[in-house]
């Protein structure tokens, strides 16, 4: 950031010389000067971080000064002091919007301070009135009140804080019967990061918003197990959610800076599921339909909620997959097709033999690994090559320890892996020679 | 997008009103209880050695937190939610929890978590179990509370204002004195 400012000043100083020597005309010099007139207004992450830190220190300092004489203050004074930082943050939010201050320092500073002021106000009111209650109840109320903060402040930091409290509340709820609130709240919070990602597609804020969004979606999907009485449905939900995330990450119209979290997190989840389903024991366990995992005493309609979640996720996945198929982006859809492979294995193969179902996923995993290696060779990406070969290696190790397979079958698996490695090496060597 | 930008200041004001309305209504309801609620005295039980106090509050355990459940209540017991628990004043001037009641119960009551304990019994986890103090005084208060609340002494109790299903601790008493006054007397070499 400092380097850019120095450069801007130097360049503006050079402009008269350049005009005099005829390198650029006066009009161009004027445009260049205007372009760098903005100076450091855009700010960088350092400004945003220090802005947020400054706000926190100021807030903390004010609270500590009053804390010294806290026990001598009356209830109304304590409550007024508890709400004062929040009022200041709202005032600052209005000020930044009215004066059109758009630097990250202002947005992040005000947003994070407002979110934390809410928590401080809730805590101080609890202390003032000697209220009991649990940490989980506190986080739940904080999450609900903090939902609009990213929208009014434009702060990605406030969004990250909200995601953290929402997941905390979802994973460790004050009352299990409130679990259903997570996904509607998530949908209500979703437009903000989507807006940041679309409007700031090449900036660091959009990358961080994308990572937060992808992680929250993934963790939320994993924590949704309480909505499913049947493991099969839960697995299908995870595969659909992972597939949708992965497809989002490979869609070509998406800006290059943000798609990777979706691709990486969705892909990792799918690979983990594929490895799990390549295990014969997993199928023997999954086939035990009718086991009720709803042991938390939740209302019966929670299972309907789970079915609705699967349906909604399937719709999203289908719409995204169709888009990629229309673009003929088959390689992008290959990993995301895991839900289809699962349904084939579950309903066509597993009733005949659990071995067939696990074999299908072994072959699918092998095909994924080979396809990844192939595309890595095409793009000359060492990282993807390692990922593909790593997947095949893990598959091979898992088959080795799978005690249900005979020595012959293990041997066949290792031979197949070995052939795949040879094939990968041969392809890379051929590619290298050709170039 | 330009239209949206124009609406943003209004949105900020709306969110500010939402925040202050939510917090303000909570404070208002608590103030009503503190000002106008029925005053009940609850005898304090010895502190849980595992959960002495956390941070700057003294964890209060109540002596009469065990209630009886009818067979019907036990059969239809809701393990997840909070229950309405009635409060009755005893002849000794101290109050205790009378049992699980319904929402339309006319007497004083609070919403609390209830846990099944023994045969036909349950334990109430009251919503008023923390007394916040200055962090310098809290350790001394903890020691005094522990000493006064033991089974032989029984000289610690809390005054709670109850109203609208809410209970708010007004004061912690040790040997008949508000805890801050008791500690001040102790530090001046007062009666032990």
Image (cartoon, coloured by chain):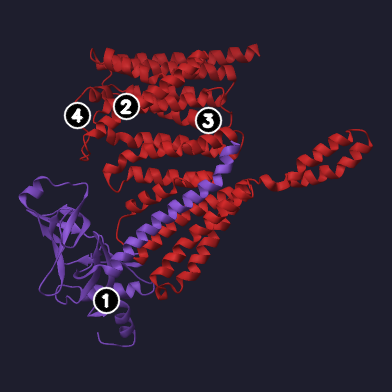
Chain colours: A red, B purple
Are the numbered discs 2 and 1 placed on the same chain, yes or no?
no
Look at the image and tell me whether residue A154 can be seen.
Answer: no
The image quarter containing residue B44 is: bottom left
In the rendered structure, the answer to whether residue A4 lies left or right of residue A95 reads right
Q: Secondary structure at mark 2?
A: helix
From this view, report whether residue A320 is shown above or below residue B164.
above
Q: Of the residues under marks 3 and 2, which one precedes in the sequence?
A: 2
Distance between the Cα atoms at labels 1 and 3? 59 Å
The correct choice, above or below, for B161 with respect to B23 in the image is: below
Question: To which chain does the residue with label 3 belong?
Answer: A
Residue B159: % across, % down: 24, 71
The secondary element bearing badge 3 is classed as: helix
Q: Secondary structure at mark 4?
A: loop
Of the residues under marks 2 and 4, which one precedes in the sequence?
Answer: 2
Q: What number is the disc on residue A260?
A: 3
Q: Earlier in the sequence, mark 3 or mark 4?
A: 3
């Amino acid at each position: 950031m400092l380097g850019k400012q120095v450069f801007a000043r130097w360049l503006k100083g050079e402009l008269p010389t350049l005009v005099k020597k005829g390198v650029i005309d006066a009009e161009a010099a004027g445009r260049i000067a205007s372009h760098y007139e903005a100076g450091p207004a855009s700010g960088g992450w350092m400004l945003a971080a220090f802005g947020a830190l400054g706000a926190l220190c100021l807030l903390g300092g004010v609270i500590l000064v009053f804390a010294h004489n806290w026990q001598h203050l009356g209830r109304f004074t304590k409550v007024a002091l508890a709400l004062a930082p929040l009022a200041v943050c709202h005032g600052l939010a209005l000020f930044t919007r009215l004066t059109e201050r758009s630097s990250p320092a202002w947005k992040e500073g005000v947003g994070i301070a407002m979110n934390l002021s809410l928590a401080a106000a809730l805590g101080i009111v609890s202390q003032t009135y000697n209220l009991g209650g649990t940490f989980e109840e506190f986080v739940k109320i904080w999450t609900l009140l903090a939902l609009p903060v990213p929208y009014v402040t434009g702060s990605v930091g406030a969004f990250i804080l909200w995601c953290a409290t929402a997941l905390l509340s979802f994973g460790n709820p004050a009352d299990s019967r409130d679990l259903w609130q997570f996904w509607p709240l998530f949908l209500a919070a979703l437009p903000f990061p989507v807006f940041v990602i679309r409007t700031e597609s090449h900036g660091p804020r959009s990358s961080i918003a994308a990572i937060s969004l992808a992680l929250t979606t993934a963790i939320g999907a994993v924590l949704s197990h309480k909505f499913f009485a049947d493991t099969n449905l839960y697995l299908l939900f995870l595969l659909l959610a992972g597939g949708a995330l992965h497809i989002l990450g490979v869609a070509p119209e998406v800006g290059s800076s943000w798609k990777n979290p979706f691709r990486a997190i969705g892909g990792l989840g799918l690979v983990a599921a594929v490895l799990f389903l390549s295990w014969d024991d997993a199928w023997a366990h999954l086939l035990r339909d009718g086991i009720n995992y709803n042991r938390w005493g939740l209302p019966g309609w929670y299972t309907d909620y789970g079915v609705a979640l699967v349906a909604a996720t399937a719709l999203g996945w289908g719409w995204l997959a169709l888009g990629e198929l229309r673009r003929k982006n088959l390689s992008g859809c290959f990993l995301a097709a895991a839900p289809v492979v699962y349904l084939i294995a579950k309903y066509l193969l597993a009733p005949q033999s659990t071995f067939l179902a696990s074999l299908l996923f072994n072959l699918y995993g092998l095909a994924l690994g080979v396809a990844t290696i192939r595309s890595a060779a095409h793009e000359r990406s060492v990282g993807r090559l390692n990922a593909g070969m790593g997947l095949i290696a893990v598959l091979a190790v898992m088959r080795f320890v799978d005690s249900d397979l005979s020595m012959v079958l293990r041997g066949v698996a290792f031979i197949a892996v070995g052939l795949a490695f040879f094939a990968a090496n041969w392809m890379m060597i051929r590619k290298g020679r050709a170039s | 997008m330009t239209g949206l930008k124009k609406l943003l200041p209004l949105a900020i004001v709306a969110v500010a009103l939402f925040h202050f309305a939510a917090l303000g209504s909570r404070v208002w309801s608590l103030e009503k209880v503190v000002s106008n609620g029925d005053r009940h005295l609850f005898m304090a039980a010895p502190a849980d050695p595992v959960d002495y106090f956390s941070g700057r509050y003294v964890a209060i355990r109540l002596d009469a937190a065990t209630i009886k459940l009818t067979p019907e209540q036990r059969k239809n017991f809701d393990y997840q939610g909070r229950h309405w628990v009635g409060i009755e004043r005893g002849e000794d001037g101290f109050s205790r929890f009378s049992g699980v009641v319904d929402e339309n119960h006319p007497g004083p009551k609070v919403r609390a978590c209830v846990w099944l304990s023994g045969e036909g019994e349950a334990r109430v986890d009251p919503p008023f179990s923390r007394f916040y103090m200055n962090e310098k005084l809290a350790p001394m208060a903890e020691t005094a509370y522990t000493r006064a609340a033991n089974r032989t002494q029984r000289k610690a109790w809390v005054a709670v204002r109850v109203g609208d299903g809410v209970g708010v601790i007004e004061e912690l008493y040790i040997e008949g004195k508000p805890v801050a006054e008791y500690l001040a007397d102790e530090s001046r070499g007062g009666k032990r």
